[in-house]
Amino acid sequence: MQLTDLTAGRLLDGYRKGEFSPVEVTGQALERARRIQPEVNAFVRLTEEDALARARESEARWRRGEPAGLVDGVPVTVKDILLLRGHPTLRGSRTVSERGGWEEDAPPVARLREHGAVFLGKTTTPEYGWKGVTDSPLTGITRNPHDRTRTAGGSSGGSGAAVALGAGPLSLGTDGGGSIRIPAAFCGIFGLKPTYGRVPLYPASAFGTLSHTGPMTRDAADAALLLDVIGAPDPRDWSALPAAPGSFTEALRSGVHGLRVAYSPSLGGQVAVRPAVAAAVRRAVAALADLGAYVVEADPDFTDPVDAFHTLWFSGAARLTESFSPHRRQLLDPGLREICAQGARTSALEYLAAVDVRMNLGRRMGRFHERYDLLVTPTLPVTAFEAGVEVPAGSVFRRWTGWTPFTYPFNLTQQPAATVPVGTDGDGLPVGMQIVAARHRDDLVLRAAHALYEAEAASAPPAPPVAA
């Protein structure tokens, strides 16, 4: 048995029964991380010494029958946007110095530490998480587990690749326009962007309330477990929600029978979806109906809000780099430098007009969810394309938002949205299906995803052999 193939839930069961120990599991996970790194480039750094020390402490607690929390001894990776105490957080940028105390954990990292998690290392991100693929001047290109010539997606691409290839079953990602869902879909794993504020964030993102933090995992049950840990208030985030009224893990048992599901294959014809993607999603939608959901084909009432998203996103980037010297600015990814310049030209009135679009979109989706519990779409209209570029070859779009029209609208509305692996295309590349619910109904998203896993309508496609 390869311990690297097990979910967090299965690892915890094995610890409880004494079948294996956190030290064994951590050792295998670190070995797997080292093996995949040369080909896939999922990590900025491994924190091996700290990981093994925490694993030994966890092993002692399990032997006493006194685990520290819900994920004691489970290996976790952390996107290098989030603070991990004692280790630099470089955000994919040569503009960030490794010097400094690095004395704080980000809120979800702090909760994981309290619950006994073992931190394997920091995963790769594009510079400051600005785009939907993962390459940066600092760390180079992160590649897809299923085809090393393809992108892992982004901006949480390192986390997606690490989970898919067994370097820890749990990872923390961030999502400002799809950055959890894009790499999760491309890598064939589960990814959840929770309701904004469900997982506190500190320091605050330069991209403001577009940016969410959430789980990237093997399946929905592991994501629910992780959300039970990290979905707790933190005084450093003034916009954090109060504690959830119940356990997300417990909510999984309720299934989908009777839920009202709107299936929108192309957002009312606004998106051209590749046939293999459309077919895989349609099969998963049929499975939801077979499980007892009431499914109808219906589109949400909005037009593409990309211009408003760009105004908010590019302005955030400009604010992030506003104080940079000319020399420091030249160190940036050229694409990031370009959107910063564009954002710096945005007026306050243009920014507020984008906020108006956002508020109207939120109102429309609020009304939509009076009629439907869930909205289901493809996560992306394409599967993973060539690595090292922002858009696929031959694309008419210059920016990554051109091929992510299903993801960023729900950052504007702050709704929970997840991607579930539902098949592959003709090249064996994963296809993801997106499940969206009204704000604060993360439980419904997780219930539907878990039901698909239980029915074997959702599953991670097999990854290729790991390099020797």
Image (cartoon, helix red, strand yellow):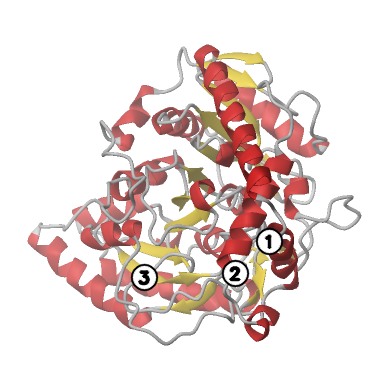
Q: CA distance from mark 2 to mark 1?
A: 8 Å
Tag 3 residue: 84
Kindly identify the amino acid type of the residue bearing the numbered disc 3.
Leu
Viewer can see residue 380: no
Q: Nearer the viewer, residue 463 or 245?
A: 245
Viewer can see residue 160: yes
Q: Quadrant of the C terminus?
A: bottom right
Sequence order check, earlier mark of 2 and 3: 3
- Residue at image location 38% in from the left, 79% down from the top: 87
Residue 202's disc number = none
- Residue at image location 57% in from the left, 80% down from the top: 95
**x and y percentages locating residue 76 in the rendered image:** 38, 63
Sequence order check, earlier mark of 1 and 3: 3
| Badge 2: residue crowd in 10 Å (few <14, some 14–19, many ≥20) | few
Tag 2 residue: 322
Q: Is residue 145 above or below residue 175?
A: below
